[in-house]
Image (cartoon, rainbow, N blue to C red):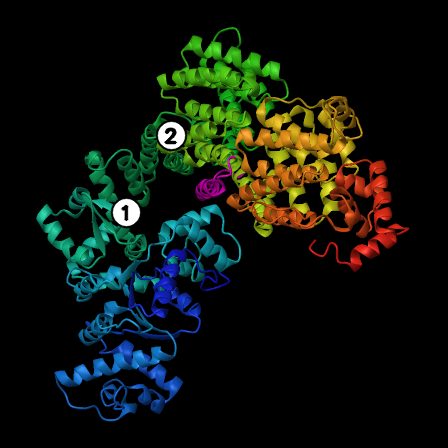
Amino acid sequence: MSIHAVSPLFVGRAGELSALERALAGARTGAASTVLVGGEAGVGKTRLVREFADRAGEAMVLVGGCMELGTEGLPFAPFTAVLRGLVRELGRDGVAALVPGGTTRGLARLLPEFGEPDGDGSEARARLFEQLLGLLERLAEDRPVVLVVEDAHWADRSTRDLLSFLVRYQRAGVRLLIVVTYRADELHRTHPLRPLLAELGRIDWVARLELRRLTRKEVVEQAASILEREPSGSDMDLIYARSEGNPLFVEALLSESGVGEALPESLRDLLLAGVERLPDDTQELLRVASAGGQRIEHDLLSAVAGRDDVALSNALRPAVAGNVLVVDGEGYSFRHALIREALHDDLLPGEHTRLHTRFAEALERDLSILPVPRGAIELAHHWHAAHDTTWALISAWHAAAAARRSAAYDEQLRMLSRVLELWDQVPDAAERIGTDHVDVLRQTATVAHLAGEYERSIALATAGLAEIDETAEPARAARLLRQRGLTGYDLSRPGHVDDLRRAASLVPADKPSRLRAQVLESLARMLYDDWQERISTAQLAMELGHEVGDANTEAHALISLTWARCQFSDIDTYLDGFAEARRIAATADAHNAMLRGAISESDVLEGAGRHERAAQVARDGIAEAERYGVARTSGTFLSINLAEPLWSLGRWDEALKVIEHALELMPPPPYRASLQGLASDIALARGRVDRAEELFAASRSVLARGRFRDQSVLPHACREVELLVARGRLDEAREAAARTLRAQDLVASPRYAWPLLVVIAQLGGDLVAELRSVAGRLETEGDCQEAHRLTFMALTGLSESELESGSGSGVGSEAGSAAGLDGASWRLKMWDAAVAAWAGLREPYSEAWTLEGAARAALEAGDRQGAGARLARARELAEQLGAAPLVERLDAFARRGRVAVADEPAPDGLPLGLTARELEVLRHVAEGHSNREIAGELFISVKTVSVHVSNILAKLGVASRGEASAVAHRIRLFADD
């Protein structure tokens, strides 16, 4: 299955690696330093040491490992290995020359190459210890030395004593770092290494590192590195569940077997080594416990094993002491899930069935042994594992109900899926559970939607529709159509509105009903093309919901109604509607409505520029989603609504943490695409173009599979253009922009259209005329859209009247003249208005790059000091954000325009007597651009460019554009560009 046996990528140990590097840095300065590195078998101690050694630079790294030999390790094994390596590298005589006193008879106890050992006794032992320490100190005179002792849990008494001596007698001024690794899971209470570690841990220069297991995200990175592709979400769920984040186990599961296949023998031997050292009675009880799952209650194990408390405790005590089991509240857990799996796999077929039957019977007698819903779910598991299909189906149905009451949707989906899987094997299944196959399909489709399994939900609803006659059972058909329509909407699949209209037609309109209220409410959510119908449908659904006492539907309809009526310019008027919807939903504990209210409210707050409040509403909603068990669906949608205002506020690192956490939950594809899009925006703004393209491609693969709304499509179009610009592919960027202008009805979505117009306007060229036409028909609602409108005006040089008419030269001449301003001063005024708008919204990135435009306009207007002040503020904001490309652009402009920034000394005057604008025009002339191309780049008229060119020729004393270009190249006027 794998391409690499070991992950080429070193994952999840950046902090520990930094700690070792800091310790080495201290040792380089002569500070005594020892690091004790602990962790369970397979967690990556050896890999960490190897990666550290590769980064140790000029330091000499000496590695020796302890060896297991019966109950005690081989005496001095790690030091013998170190000494043997030194002899290979330096030769016997080279090592002997470094030993203090010149005598090597002490070292002869470790290697026969050094002759006959001196006498026995404590003095000889002391000489060995001193000679080895002296050898390390002499080696450290030439360069830093790192001594690594691996697998100290196997160290014999002599090795432990020598190790203790070396650590204790490290001297300041000696460039020596000692690193010791050990298996923490091997250290039972009486293990001889435990007191040594405690003793060494009290020494000032000794630090301890405990390697944790990898997170799910890190396991995904490790697996992707091994396979050279990212595994599917279902494969990763299984790999992570089985490995529990142990890197060695991940590698073994990927390298030696399929994801869901039996354990590789090498891994099984490692896992069961500790079990096989236990008494036979304890091993037998562990086999019984393995059928109970990863964690098992003491009382349940006692009932199944048929032993009283005292007998059970006595039999399990060696397993706890041997670190095979750990005490976990009122029960026990296997130290690692794969230990339980290996034991369970060793059960004989008859033994397997008998044990699971005994567990099921014990739980049937007293389900209260386990908490709800765990008892019902485990009962279903044991009947299924015992191959009793009838009771497996019945118990799975009851377990699904218990899971529903606990809002455990993933478990409910698993149990309902099992009912469907067993249905044909139980002839009287409908009588056994009191409902028919279609109803089970409908319930499973609903739960699959709640659990984020959208494709599966649609397939189940479609299967249910295929089994019924709409004419004979219109209400059942309407429920299934409503569910398919809701899920189709979340996947942006064509036909979801048709499903809901069809459902509405099947429910009688002549008398109020809960089903009709629900169908109309769902339909109201989807009606984006006809706002008046949306409002009237939501109003009717709300009234019906209230009339029939369905608070959930009433709250949902009020949310849709409030959202549809909301005006960003008067946002406070509408917030009471969301508060009232929350109040109504709370009366019925309708958490879906409460969470949807948080989604809608945070969305309109962000649209209105209330970034801080939008973030808080979304954050509170995420916490609620986690409490209700829908973190993967509503929670990740709210993560989008949290990351967006964090992006606006310039809190990009915080936004990335939110995005990463949400992506770890494996959200539905549309939500994943939006999260990746926001992460792409941050990566691009910080100059990580490769990462931005990778994220953009991932989101594009999702958006290509459906018909998505403007809130997804238009930001995606912005990213495409910006990425092409970042790669210098301007012609392709203009083509992409033109395609979007032709394909999308931008007038219908001002909120998402204005940012797109601003991005495209920066391309200049022939598109500007078309942009002006669109902008003239585009409404502006609220402070955010106004800020974008002002930015667009500044970029294109349009006045208010020109923008409204969709025409004009784009130099602001008419409005500027009316205000008594020349063109340059008018452009400065427009840029400063845009800057003020973004500053008022507290959007630092937009403020920074509009400050760049304002600085250019100030320089053109002859205000060099003002340009410097604007550049200084822009640079400050860009640096805080880590927006490296913008910082570089600002610095280049300051150099090119000879503008002093912040506390820099005032620059000399502009070269050759040229104005700032003439200098810019000359740069384009030197690059071979025509007057029309220069006009498009600088957003000025062709006539104005011609005037500037004439002035340039006169000031340079040349007769042609070619001669002017030659002068610029000869004196390297634009060498910094």
Label 2 CA crowd tier, 10 Å (few <14, some 14–19, many 20+): some
Question: Residue 766 placed where, x, y %?
Answer: 79, 37
Q: Secondary structure at mark 2?
A: helix
Label 2 or label 1, whichever lies nearer to me, is 2
> Is 139 situated left or right of 827 in this image?
left
Instruction: Point out the residue furthest to the left here.
Output: 310
**Stretch of the chain drawn in magenta:** 649-669
The percent position of residue 610, horizontal first and vertical second, equals: 50, 26
Q: Position of residue 424 (x, y in %)?
A: 42, 36
Q: Please determine whether, in this image, residue 627 is positioned above or below residue 43.
A: above
Tag 1's secondary structure? loop
What kind of residue is marked 2?
Answer: Glu
Q: Observer-nearest residue: 282 or 36?
A: 36
The amino acid on which the numbered mark 1 sits, given as a three-letter code, is: Gly
Q: Residue at x 59, y 44 (%)?
A: 696
Would you place residue 449 above or below residue 585 in this image? below
Confirm whether the magenta stretch covers residue 18: no
- Residue for badge 2: 624
The Cα atoms of the two marked residues, 2 and 1, are separated by 30 Å
- The vertical placement of 162 against 290, above or below, is below
Q: Which residue is situated farthest in the bottom direction here?
A: 115
Can residue 317 be seen here? The reply is: yes
Is residue 663 magenta-colored? Answer: yes
Side of 149 where 721 appears, left or right: right
Residue situated in front as seen by the camera: 630 or 686? 686
